[in-house]
Amino acid sequence: MITTGEVSKRGKDWSMGWSQWQGFNEGILAVKYSLKTLSDNGFHNVALNKASGFGCGSFEYMLSHNATTMWESWWRSEDLYSHNHPMLGASAEWMVSSVAGVGLHPKTTGGSTVLFWPRFPNSANVLEFAGATQGTRRGDFSIAWKFEDLPDNRDLYASASVTVHIRLFVPPDGKSVLRIPEYSNGEGVDASMKYATSVPNLDEALMLSSEECLSRRDAKMGFSYNFEFSNKTRLFSKVERKKAIGTPCHSFLFHSTLDDTTWGETKTVTGISTNGIEVPLVAGLYDILVSNWQLRPEVATSNGRIGSIPDYFKSEDVGPYCADSDTFDWNIEDASHLI
């Protein structure tokens, strides 16, 4: 931690000094708002880097110390803080609403309307796919997205042009809105959308997908290491050990049993450069493709961590909502969920 700068001396005392951009120093209140505020205002890549960071003040730190539940504190403790506590659990809501892209619409009442708003990482090295389901009194709304046409060479995961494949399910009597994502320069995207002429057996796809995911977990295809303390040396050492927790699994919406779905006519939804575009959706299954999505590297410093705020704003990449200094490309109504 001293080497990486996570712990530094302030006068005579040691104190935590990790980067806010590669981990957390927020607590029970701010962790809820920091991630969603970043994602909602065009800095989703920064939010993702905080959530996928390493060292103290990160989920990696918990997992690397054998955590299977959320802790009460970012700091490891054997006698003070609980190892099974919802204190920092608000991050889970961000994973569903921002990383996957489904949540209650900010202007809904009684949870009657759902907002589909998928956002994507700058680089596929951070994340390649995501999916989630939002339960409501009208039924379960589901979303899944993945990068397609990724190159075989992972060195190109931060520079390739790819296709983003999105699937959405709106239950009977469901009411929802799809907010089409924007390119990093703030320009609207053109997306092709098609609608299933009849809804396939999603229950079967969900069951089979869950069984396959359980099999992957049994094979321990998740988090791959942990730190163990030696009573002899009185030090922690890194041990490579495969685990079930953290095993990646694709959404049931992309299960092979849905490959024979009959789709209707493909329509093009043309994006606009002011506030993107929102599409109202009726009940059913949707398949959406966004072509020519350009992946790009993160702004980073020499030590491999994401750049500090000065490093970031010295770059040409200041996010889609700051690309044009004459506009503020954000719907103020979205602020209602932050209050």
Image (spheres, rainbow, N blue to C red):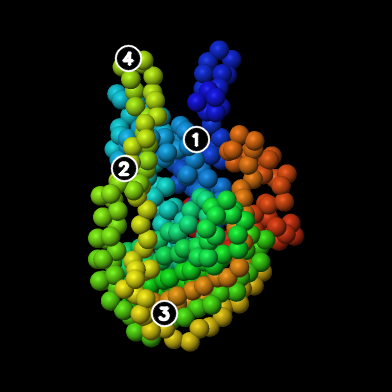
Could you tell me residue 247's position as x and y percent?
Answer: 34, 50
Q: On the image, numbered disc 1 is attached to which residue? A: 25
Q: Is residue 25 above or below residue 230?
A: below
Residue drawn where x is 40% and y is 61% of the image: 131
State which tag comes first along the sequence, 3 or 2: 2
Indicate the quadrant where residue 205 lies.
bottom left
Query: Tag 4's secondary structure?
Result: loop
Q: On the image, numbered disc 2 is attached to which residue? A: 243
Label 2: how many Cα within 10 Å (few below 14, some 14–19, many 20+): some
Identity, as a three-letter code, of the amino acid under mark 4: Lys
State which tag comes first along the sequence, 1 or 3: 1
**CA–CA distance between discs 1 and 3?**
41 Å
Query: Tag 2's secondary structure?
Result: loop
**CA–CA distance between discs 1 and 2?**
27 Å
Could you tell me residue 105's position as x and y percent?
Answer: 45, 65
**CA–CA distance between discs 1 and 4?**
32 Å
From the viewer's side, name the closer residue of 299 and 213: 213
State which tag comes first along the sequence, 2 or 4: 4
Is residue 274 something one can see in this rendering? no
Residue drawn where x is 48% and y is 57% of the image: 128
The answer to whether residue 104 is left or right of residue 305 is left
